[in-house]
Image (cartoon, rainbow, N blue to C red):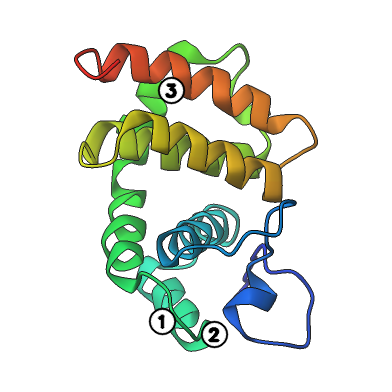
């Protein structure tokens, strides 16, 4: 089976080694580590087409340490079945065809859209900020700006009472 992950090449298997710190070198929370794992798992699912349960098992075996596993196990498997809904919500906000998006940006946008639509316990500002940070770490040079603009417009439409 083909696998594709965003894991940095490193001989270490600790979460801090495989989950790169942001440029400010601040320590990541357990939830932020889980968010990075969700993004990596979505990317792997999107590129390799591996079953969600296989990806979950692989990540469970690979990552060690303090991670918000409950969040990862709730959010990651919930996104692939919603891809048609998420893509339909994203399409009117895009300035290009979905097929023209970078795979990392597409994964980040789907992740952010899922949280805006289905995780109202997470404030929209947190959703946008976390997705922008993920795009800065894993995406193209200015991809985070695109992610910010799309998710900001989505939040204004979806979370009208909160915005």
Q: Nearer the viewer, mark 1 or mark 2?
A: 2
For mark 1, what is the residue? Answer: 57
**Element marked by disc 3:** helix
Depicted 34 relative to depicted 108: above or below: below
Horizontal arrangement in the rendering, residue 99 relative to residue 53 (left or right): right
Q: Is residue 105 visible?
A: yes
Residue ID for mark 2: 62
The alpha-carbon separation of the residues under discs 1 and 2 comes to 9 Å
**Residue in view at x 24 percent, y 19 percent:** 162
Q: Secondary structure at mark 1?
A: helix
Q: Residues within 10 Å of mark 2 (few under 14, many from 20)?
A: few
Choose mark 3 or mark 2, whichever is in front: 2
Instruction: Answer with mark 3 or mark 1, whichever residue precedes in sequence.
Output: 1
Residue 52 versus residue 88 in the image, above or below: below
Percent position (x, y) of residue 35? 46, 56
Q: Residue at x 46, y 19 (%)?
A: 152
Residue appearing at x 27%, y 69% in the figure = 70
Secondary structure category for the residue under label 2: helix
First of labels 1, 2 by sequence position? 1
Location of residue 60 (image quadrant): bottom left
Crowdedness of circle 3 by 10 Å Cα count: few (<14), some, many (20+)?
A: some
Measured Cα–Cα span from mark 3 to mark 1: 29 Å
Is disc 3 in contact with disc 2, using a CB cutoff of under 8 Å? no
**Mark nearer the N terminus (3 vs 2):** 2
Does residue 84 show up?
Answer: no
The percent position of residue 157, horizontal first and vertical second, equals 31, 12
Residue corresponding to mark 3:
90
**Vertical placement of 49 versus 103: above or below?**
below
């Amino acid at each position: 089976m083909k696998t594709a992950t965003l894991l940095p090449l490193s001989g270490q298997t600790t979460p801090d080694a495989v989950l790169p710190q942001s440029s400010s070198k601040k320590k990541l929370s357990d939830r932020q580590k889980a968010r990075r794992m969700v993004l990596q798992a979505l990317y792997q699912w999107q590129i390799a087409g591996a079953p969600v349960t296989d990806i979950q098992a692989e990540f469970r075996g690979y990552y060690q340490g303090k991670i918000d596993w409950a969040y990862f196990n709730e959010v990651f498997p919930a996104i692939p079945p919603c891809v048609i809904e998420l893509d339909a919500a994203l399409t009117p906000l895009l300035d290009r065809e979905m097929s023209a998006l970078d795979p990392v940006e597409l994964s980040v946008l789907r992740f952010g859209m899922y949280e805006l639509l289905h995780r109202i316990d997470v404030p929209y500002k947190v959703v946008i900020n976390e997705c922008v940070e993920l795009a800065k770490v894993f995406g193209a040079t200015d991809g985070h700006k695109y992610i910010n603009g799309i998710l900001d417009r989505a939040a204004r439409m979806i979370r009208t009472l909160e915005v």
